Image (cartoon, rainbow, N blue to C red):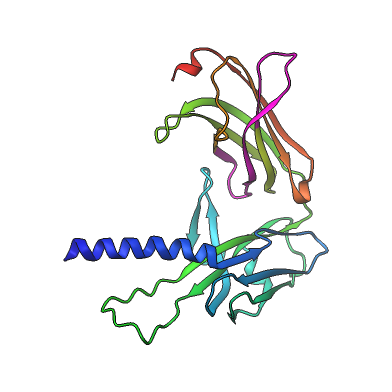
Amino acid sequence: MFNKLTVILLLSFCFFSQAVMANLLISPTRISFDERQRTAKVTVINTSDEYKTYRVHWSEKQSTSTGGYVTLLEPTATSLSPMTRLSPKQMRLAPGEKQTVKIAIRKPKQLANGEYRSHLLFQALPNENPNSTSSIKINMIMSYSIPVILREHAEVPKVFIEQAQVIKNQGNQRLQFKLKLNRETHFSSYGKLTAFYQQNANAKLEAIAEIGNLSIYSDVKNAEVMLSLFSDKTLDKPGTVIFKYIGADEYQDINFAEYALAISPKMLQL
């Protein structure tokens, strides 16, 4: 009985996890305030075929060097949420209906220079089904968050690619890249990290791997990044791989970092 119940719960969790992503559309998925900007808007669309209730509130997260987050229980000195107002904080949307959530900032006087960040959390509340005869009730609240950033007296961050190496993905047995990046200054970076293969000095650069939305937040100085090859690309010949980290949005076209890795025959035999 225990094993059967466990399987049901796991299958239900997988189903609802996939459904919440398919039933909720949020735009934009990242907000960066400049020093003069005081308001921003986020559009929420119910893409399901039933009424949905969504709750909106702040979540504090500490970023990690591997790209994940640790949820914090309380705001910190660099949290943005204490100086914001949200409207509305809850909404009920019909299928296909959309709602705009407004974020307003009230900066305190003599705000210290630096970067302030909180994450705006959208929670899809479970619908009650009075006709259900099942003895098992699963009331899970699915959520999705977006980073919201304010920079006071911002500086362009300095980023360096300290190391790059070729490793083998133990899951699919394909080659991939592992990079170590270092960031200086108290402001996060944001942009696109692309790996280009060049067989020789006269050959054209060929994009073989990419991460489109790479942030190195202000609460970490070092980042470890795994870069997987495109599904239609392979790394099977010696040459050079050039990594370029180029800024996007408020850092549009800024060349954060570049690194060249010579590919030897030995590297290809992993």
Q: Position of residue 145 (x, y in %)?
A: 57, 63
Q: Residue furthest left?
A: 1
Q: Residue furthest bottom?
A: 130
Q: Which one is in front, 234 or 167?
A: 234
Query: Is 136 situated left or right of 78 in this image?
Result: left
The correct choice, above or below, for 167 with respect to 211 in the image is above
The correct choice, above or below, for 156 with respect to 96 in the image is above
Query: Is 164 situated left or right of 150 in this image?
Result: left
Q: Which one is in front, 112 or 31?
A: 31
Residue 237 in sight here: yes
Identified at 68% across, 26% down, the residue is 206
Answer with the quarter of the image where residue 201 lies. Answer: top right
Q: Position of residue 50 (x, y in %)?
A: 52, 78
Q: Position of residue 117 (x, y in %)?
A: 64, 59
Q: Position of residue 252 (x, y in %)?
A: 79, 45
The correct choice, above or below, for 226 with respect to 242 in the image is below
Q: How many marks?
A: 0
Tell me the quadrant of the picture where the N terminus can be found: bottom left
Tell me the quadrant of the picture where the C terminus can be found: top left
Q: Which residues are magenta?
A: 195-224
The question of residue 213 being in magenta is answered with yes
Identified at 76% across, 44% down, the residue is 156
* Magenta stretch: helix, strand or loop mostly: strand
The question of residue 8 being in magenta is answered with no
Residue 76 in sight here: no
Q: Residue furthest right?
A: 36
Answer with the quarter of the image where residue 223 lies. Answer: top right
Identified at 69% across, 46% down, the residue is 190
